[in-house]
Image (cartoon, rainbow, N blue to C red):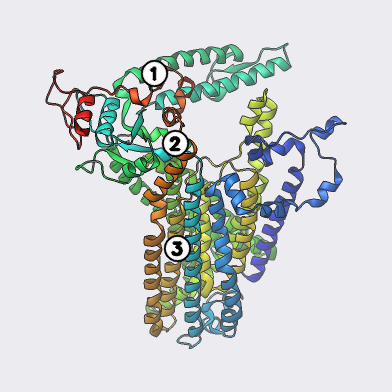
Amino acid sequence: MATIQDIGVSAAINILSAITFLLAFAFLRLQPINDRVYFPKWYLKGSRESPSHGGAFVRKFVNLDMRSYLRVLSWMPAALKMPEDELISHAGLDSAVYLRIYLIGLKIFAPITVLAFVILVPVNWTNNTLESLKVQHSDIDKLSISNIPLGSKRFIAHLTMAYVFTFWTCYVLLREYEIVATMRLRFLASEKRRPDQFTVLVRNIPPDPDESIGELVEHFFLVNHPDHYLTHQVVYNANKLDKMVKEKKKMQNWLDYYQLKYERNTSKRPTTKTGFLGCFGSKVDAIEYYTSEIERIEKEETEEREKVMKDPKSVVPAAFVSFRSRWGAAVCAQTQQTSNPTVWLTEWAPEPRDVYWDNLSIPFVYLTVRRLIIAVAFFFLNFFYVIPIAFVQSLANIEGIEKAAPFLKPLIEMGTIKSFIQGFLPGIALKIFLILLPSILMFMSKVEGLTSVSSLERRSAFKYYIFLFFNVFLGSIIAGSALEQLKTFLHQSANQIPRTIGVAIPMKATFFITYIMVDGWAGVAGEILRLKPLIIFHLKNFFLVKTEKDREEAMDPGSIGFDSNEPQIQLYFLLGLVYAVVTPFLLPFILIFFGLAYVVYRHQIINVYNQEYESAAAFWPSVHGRIIVALIISQLLLLGLLSTKGAGQSTPVLLVLPVVTFYFYKYCKNRYEPAFVEYPLQEAMRKDTLERAREPGFDLKAYLVNAYIHPVFKADEDDEKFSISDEPEAEQVLVATKRQSRRNTPVPSKYNGSESPSLPEIVNDQRL
């Protein structure tokens, strides 16, 4: 069990690590050679050029201005200087609202920390309950609720603070929800024209023996949305073609590398092996080999491209349908299209760069099966991850290590080594075990079949949060408490075990403190250093870069990483709210995390990250909901804890809090969440009216016609087969249907001949 000395050793290690990372960043960012690593966003925007200095050649690589090194912390005020409105314009609403999550942490926990240390810490400290119980404890545990005697009236202070903390948290969340909802509506109203504002994604299009998917879509929307339908783009299953394009690009990179290598030394032709990773197989001339491979792939790519375009089976029963106005798109996206709710399913289309094309080809009927399989796999992943969590907890238990490896006892019992093991090693071990988890969860989300990158990240974030709650939070408490108090459990009567567990749970605060310092202090400071992108950029720059475009592609700005970072933040909210009343000593560590992370990520968002998409803060309801869940969990755990402390009479008083919190959540959901799910028709009409007045001659069809073409076809978007006719709208030739049209939904044709009326005739008759 970690003592104050152990926590001090861990704090010293992590503070030293954080300072080292920050100083290294402050030095490296000033070097001209690293400018593209630490300011890539400005290069992508075209507003920054590589630093060039006259004079000595070395100035192009090293900053020789000694005065600049005196301002090593100047990046901090610079990161805080940009106003929020300018930040939204520069980085998007998603990035600005993401930063507000850290601000919420500061707003919630700063007053809570002050109140807890002024009221609860003295109440807890002035007792000797832990010494009388003879359980393992440290001085930190004396600051917790565990040090209060059974049935003491001092629990009134904890009950009062539970109410105060709950109401304060709800007040902050209410204000933030209102602010973010207003920001979203204002952003949508002021945002420039985007294809997704006029487009819906239609899925599960029923098959028809007489018409192709394209004809069927055009027919359906001309009949059911005659005044608003504009154009559509069918979805092709181009996954195989996409793999060929990526493979060709990889081969081209290797060819560029070997050509550059040969140019530097023309006396020797470079060679490679044709086997796995170039390490096995026969040795061949590298340039000739990769040239022939590229030619082979180009031939296969051409054949596959023609096959995709000509084979009707390559067309997926889904389409992007665009409308003449935002109002028309909103009506279609937010209504049921037919009497059968399982076909012609419509939803807002993601913006083009947000589309996850690989999943559009998945048949809709497979999605339920896929999600069931992933749910089962996720359950077993949670279950089996208990093993490494238990191992991590064993590292915090010196007695367990000594029993497993008795020969290490003399080394472990050394003061510094013991403090290192209990104060630092568990946190870093847990961090290592969680490194691969976000990638695993993202893969599972992709298998589920979600169609946008933003929805994939939100689903993956949900899984990660569930995992952190059950394995990191509950798993660490249960496993750690059992390991630390095992001796006590074995030598007491059965009716005393629940009480001992109730005492032991608050003691796990020391483990979470070490984790916060490793992940929240050193980890955040390491984020700004960007060591991995720095190394990769210089390797690419040295071996592969030949042109300015190559150099731009070598930059790796990255993104916020919502799927992994947001659940981690939610873990800190959970820890802070749970331990605010139980062990207030943990709160300052969380405050430092939120403050440091806010400054670091603000700098990264301004200068580094290039967000892959813009969802207009669609993730906010999930963030709000998870904080509410953490608040309710903290109330229920406090209720259970007090029941083991002889304060059962407080149960009715505490039961009010979860109920009030839940109804507060329902109020926020009903009041504000619709702004994040639906697009108000009033706002759509207002924006359409203003746009028509400002740009009456704008050709919306030309703007939308190729917006949702698969990326592998972008090179051919001027080709006729990828374009819609450029005829004026008034002279548009409608496709003739080979079956009888109806007002509601297309049905299988009863006619095989050409005697059925054409679509133009039907539409004209219905309009008369």
Residue density around tag 2, few if under 14, some if 14–19, many if 20 or more, within 10 Å: many
Question: Which residue is denoted by mark 1 in the rendering?
Answer: 721
Residue 85 image point, x, y percent: 59, 51
Label 2: state its secondary structure: helix
As measured in the structure, the alpha-carbon distance from the residue carrying label 1 to the one carrying label 2 is 21 Å
Label 1: state its secondary structure: helix
Question: Which residue is denoted by mark 3 in the rendering?
Answer: 474
User: Farthest right residue?
Assistant: 55
Residue at the spot 44% in from the left edge and 27% down from the top edge: 702
**Could you tell which of marks 1 and 3 lies nearer the N-terminus?**
3
User: Farthest bottom residue?
Assistant: 153
Q: State if disc 2 and disc 1 touch (CB < 8 Å).
A: no
**Could you tell which of marks 3 and 2 lies nearer the N-terminus?**
2
Question: What label does residue 195 carry, if any?
Answer: 2
Q: Is residue 480 visible?
A: yes
Residue density around tag 3, few if under 14, some if 14–19, many if 20 or more, within 10 Å: some
